[in-house]
Image (cartoon, rainbow, N blue to C red):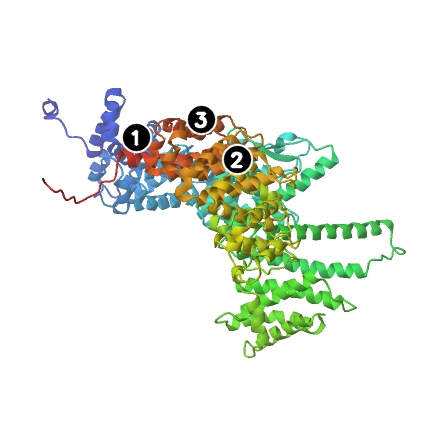
Amino acid sequence: MVETLIQGGEVAAVSHRLLTTTKVLLQFAEQSSLATLVFTRHLGCVIAALCQLGYRPHRAGSSGTEEEKELSAQERQTCKEALKNLFGKVYQPIIIKELLILQGGPKQSGTVGSSSGSGRRATLGSAPAWLRRLCGQLLSERLMQPNGVQAVVRAILEGGTGSESDWKKCEGVTKILLACPQQSPSADSYYRQVCPQILDLLHFEDKISAQQFQRVATRVTLLMAQEKPTFAQQYLLTPLLAPLHCCTVASNGSHTQTTVEEMELTRCVEDVYKIWVVGNSPSALLLQALEEVLPVIFTLFCFTKQNVSHLRAPCQEILLWYLNNTETSLALSTLRQLSGLQGQKNELAADSHFTPGSNGGARCSFRDSCSDEDDALYEKLSGEQWRLDCLMQLLVELKDSDLPGDFFLDLLQEMTSWAAAADEEENDVELDVSAMTLLEVEQQLLGRTERQGQRLALLQVLAVMVESLQHSLLLRKTTQVVDFMVSLLQRASMCLDQATVPSRGNPIESQTLSMGMSLVATLLSGPQLTAEDYSSMSRLIPSLEILSQKHSEVVIQELASNLRTVIATHGACWPENLTAASAQHPRNPEMKTKNKNAPFRKKQKIQTKENDSHTGPHPSPLDSNSPNKTHIRHSASSRGSAAGTTLEEGGRTSDPCTSNKPFSDWLLEACDPDIPTRAFALRVLTQKMQNRNMEALQDQEKVFMLFLENLEHEDSFIYLSAIRGLAALADSYPERILTRLLKDFQHGPSLSTSSKEHSLETRLKMGEVLMRASRAMGELAPHLGRPLVGIFLQGTRDSDQSIRASSLSNLGELCQKMDYALGPLAQELSCCLTALIKTEKEAEVRRAAVHVIALLLRGLCDKTTQVLSNVLLELYRALKWVVHSDVDDVAVLHAQLALEELDDVMRRFIFPEQKLEKKIVVLP
């Protein structure tokens, strides 16, 4: 029919035929039934036709006949308007895809491949120059529209799979967004319009698109910070960090100025984490911008450590990223600010504080000033102490960094300079006030008071660092050890220079100085010392020379002189007595000197290393939170000597059982008031009982009573030895000894000399003895464990939470070894544990109850379905209740571990391992 209609008619010009076809397609697109067909199959063709009809320049030098065939100006304007209307109707990412295809050619073949129908157009050659310019202009217009950035990103990245090509596309989009188009009036107006849209890419909730959008936003921000820092600071970093900056603005009568809502603060912290930490591309601008808000982030981190908040981890990672990537000098200055030793800039406003948010975050709001001066002072001091504790936790995370050691040495050096200044002040105590005004006198006194306050703050930070951080973190390298010794020897030499009358000095300082110089001797005796090592140690020579000439003790004089000789000659001259000195102080820091008057004491844990099964950073409640340990550890006297640490950790300098001393003498020494002597005698008695010594077996009742009496001693060195002795007796004579121990654990100490005030502590120590005895029962546990289970179950109803947790701790250890003997007790155990899990108010007890179930499943293993068949569903429901309802994170963690144990058991039960076995059958 069409052929009949056009036959004999005049053939129109090429451009008019294209115009007619395009109009018809656009009319089809106005019909709802045909619009989808036109736009899905022919959208690219329609856009190309409208571009050619409306924007193709006139051909130069064409004939008059050709001029008559060109479109009129009105027709060209109609095509331009049609193209504009089409762009307003269609989904923008599709428009951008088609424009990129028109602009492309072989260079854009990678982009073309992602669009529909692109296979037919991928082989097109380069577009004409006018079309490339037109497509670039149209793309720029699409980009600078509202949500134009999002449209460009979707057009290029939509449907990505995370492969290498997607990473290249992200880089391509980044370069497109970073380049200011020629059509923009100015670069400032372009970035002012585009940068807010780039920040919006960080906040997508769609998981499929969020990762790619965040990647693009992060890359654009990082590249802008490097290539266009002025625009990046003004239009990206300042708006992004605005909520944190608002927290630092002091209120001037309007409370709303210091209020930052939870959603704003959460989004800000997450954005900082994405760009700084995940992007991980340090630059001067990024570090400087982060430095300005770091005090607020640290204050927020301290707040999250007191509560359960999802902001804790990102705040910690941000702080660690800055400390790891900034220069050492800036990092040390930052640590000084965060520790309170240096005035902070941009810190949290004085009238503002963080409060918990409804969604697990935090909000910054105004607070009223405290009217009570005592309460205000207490709040200030406790807040400063908490900030120090949180800072130490950050430094612990810097395991592979020299920064903690550098900070420690920097503070020591400052303390040395403070000591010199303090001595000068003491020599000039009297102020000549005759020629001074009252204001000058007041300023002098206030300045002295301020300096004393700074010194106290410095000493506090040093004390917290020494207490919280391990020596391996503080002094990781030889150079740091040398710096430490330089500071130590300088202080010692300054004291000698300023002393007018020779004296013996402080014995503690002399011992510390002797140990320090022995440490230097140990370093010098190390293998393969280089010239740089000797050059570093040469800084010790002036101080060693002063000590060798002026110190009051001859031993220290000789040691200092010998060290000076070795360092000065680079090891060419090595005195013999220096070798002996280095041998007395080996590199192993755990080897201590047995001296009851040692200046430094270490509180002992009740459980020794050989029996401690939880040595990780997150121990179970039966280890770190068990009352058998924590209550005794906190109540232990600090008089426990360093020798106790050596003995408890298994280190011995000699075998006490080889001594020819009579057994009666050991019994007498076990009553000696000298703590090391008594503890050593108790350890000897324990070994004699383990070795079945005849005299010890004959006097076992006396030995037993000695252990019971020393169990109540307040020094950890003593009662730890008594615990080991009672555990050894219970292992040798379980039936008789366990009965007495169970009675004392249940009702308190039975000795006439026992102190009623310390009855709880003694019961907890007895619980530790029973735990060790339970571990040592082995195959006898089913026979000997029934009475213990009964006592422990009764202990779960005790009025004191420590006894309840201790009983559960012991119950868990025992249940691991009872196997099938638990069958008759399964129902009682299940009822007890589920009731405690759901009704107990103390989190520590609930943790222990959940952990008992985990130990029970771990001990029974494949026997679980047989022994606990009647109560397994009940225990499973209790564990699920903990996971979904318990507010204590540790209890939830142990419930999840127990569920994993149960899952492994059931998997092995339902899907037993297939084994290939060869069987030989004898036929009849």
Q: Residue furthest right?
A: 434
Q: Residues within 10 Å of mark 3 (few under 14, many from 20)?
A: few
Residue 580 on image: x %, y %: 57, 72
* As drawn, 466 above or below 512: above
* As drawn, 55 above or below 633: above
Mark 2, residue position: 805
Q: Residues within 10 Å of mark 2 (few under 14, many from 20)?
A: many
* Quarter assignment of residue 677: bottom right
Of 544 and 576, nearer the camera is 576
Of 597 and 662, nearer the camera is 662
Q: Amino acid at mark 1?
A: Cys
Residue 387 on image: x %, y %: 61, 44
From mark 2 to mark 1, how far is it between C-alphas? 84 Å
Mark 3, residue position: 831
- Give the residue displayed 16% in from the left and 43% down from the top: 919
Q: Quadrant of the N terminus?
A: top left
Between discs 3 and 1, the one toward the N terminus: 1
Q: Amino acid at mark 2?
A: Ala
Mark 1, residue position: 79
Q: Secondary structure at mark 3?
A: helix
Of 515 and 35, nearer the camera is 515
* As drawn, 525 above or below 220: below
From mark 3 to mark 1, how far is it between C-alphas? 83 Å
Q: Quadrant of the C terminus?
A: top left
Of 694 and 115, nearer the camera is 694
Q: Judge whether residue 142 can be spotted in this image.
A: no
Between discs 2 and 1, the one toward the N terminus: 1
Residue 571 on image: x %, y %: 54, 76
* Quarter assignment of residue 251: top right
Q: CB under 8 Å between callouts 3 and 1?
A: no
Q: Is residue 472 left or right of residue 598?
A: left
Q: Residue furthest bottom?
A: 573
